[in-house]
Amino acid sequence: MNRATQNFKIQKYIAVISVALFLIKLFAWYLTHSVAILTDALESIVNVVAGFIGLYSLYVSGKPKDQDHPYGHGKVEFLSAAIEGLLIGIAGIFIIREAVLNLYEPHSIQKLDYGIYLVAVTAIINLFAGMICVKTGKKNNSLALIASGKHLIADTYTTIGIIIGLVLLFVTGISWIDSAVAIIFALVIFYTGYKIVRSSIAGIMDEADMELLNKMVIFLNENRNPNWIDLHNLRIIKYGAMIHLDCHLTVPWYFNVHQAHDEIDRLSGLVKQHFGDSVELFVHSDGCLDFSCALCEKTDCEVRKHAFQKKIVWTMENISSNKKHQID
């Protein structure tokens, strides 16, 4: 099963689970008339909408490249995540409104113990579903799946907090606890929405993924080949589950086209073996120049003009530069 298919399958299950959990929370609110449980139920509406939006986005992003979309359809995942984050933020605002109104006109709470049991079940299911989403999303580089997972996990934390508040309400009978709990976790929901929107905008604007870039630099340093004299102008762009990497690779100037291409294939093979087949590489080969001798570790070079001086360790800063490395 390829990554796009796996992402779509998991998101399909998440969408179905979201509907079931929403119905359970709605029933819990019907039994109790608790505004805190209503808070959880309203967030679940967002879960349902976001689940199906995420499902559609993964369906679109899984389509093969075509003439109109030569880099694929992966960008739709960023739009999906942005919509999901926006909906979460709106839900947070609406929940605060309902909680404040309940402070002035509190509803009588009924059958709170049943409500606590039902909501606790949804928290457990949400937690496991969210963890699976995030783990698979990180493995398959799917922002839509990661966003869905983080949303479900945030929903779990919110639910746990609400359960604690409901237990206090059940024990003490203090009515304003219901609204206070709802307001606190509405703010948490709003902040979660903001973070999701922020990450999706970063993807739309092709903001550098520093975490991924750092992993790439560490891996390349650990697997350097003597024929890879220099690597620079490295850039990474994410299109949903696809990662597009381009860079300039400096090889010995006397290599013919086939030999240079072999080195590119070797680099590409290593990267794909470590990061998965979702990585697409565009590598430009450069021939070394006289100043390259000082940093070249190739011991069998018969045309060396200068002695080797020192190895330049690739870093996020120097590997991203558009200039060949030199020893000052």
Image (cartoon, helix red, strand yellow):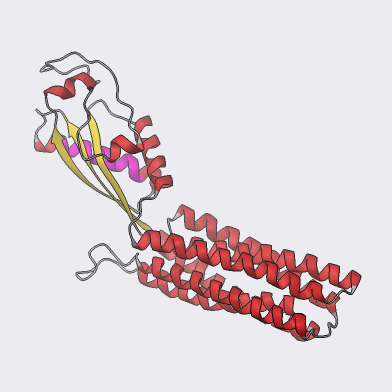
Q: Which residue corresponds to the image point at 24% horizontal and 37% vertical from the top-left?
A: 232
Residue 1 seen anywhere in this rendered image of the structure: no
Q: Where does the C terminus fall, quadrant-wise? A: top left
Q: Which residues are magenta?
A: 259-272
The answer to whether 172 appears left or right of 59 in the picture is right
Image coords of residue 252 (percent x, y): 15, 28
Residue 4 counted in the magenta span: no
Name which quarter of the figure residue 238 lies in.
bottom left
Name the foreground residue: 163 vs 21. 163
Please check the rendered image and state whether residue 269 is part of the magenta-colored stretch, yes or no.
yes
| Residue in view at x 20 percent, y 36 percent | 323
User: Seen from this angle, which residue lies furthest right?
Assistant: 172
- Across and down, in percent, residue 40 comes to 68, 74
Q: Nearer the viewer, residue 314 or 8?
A: 314
Residue 177: quadrant of the picture: bottom right
Is most of the magenta stretch helix, strand or loop? Answer: helix
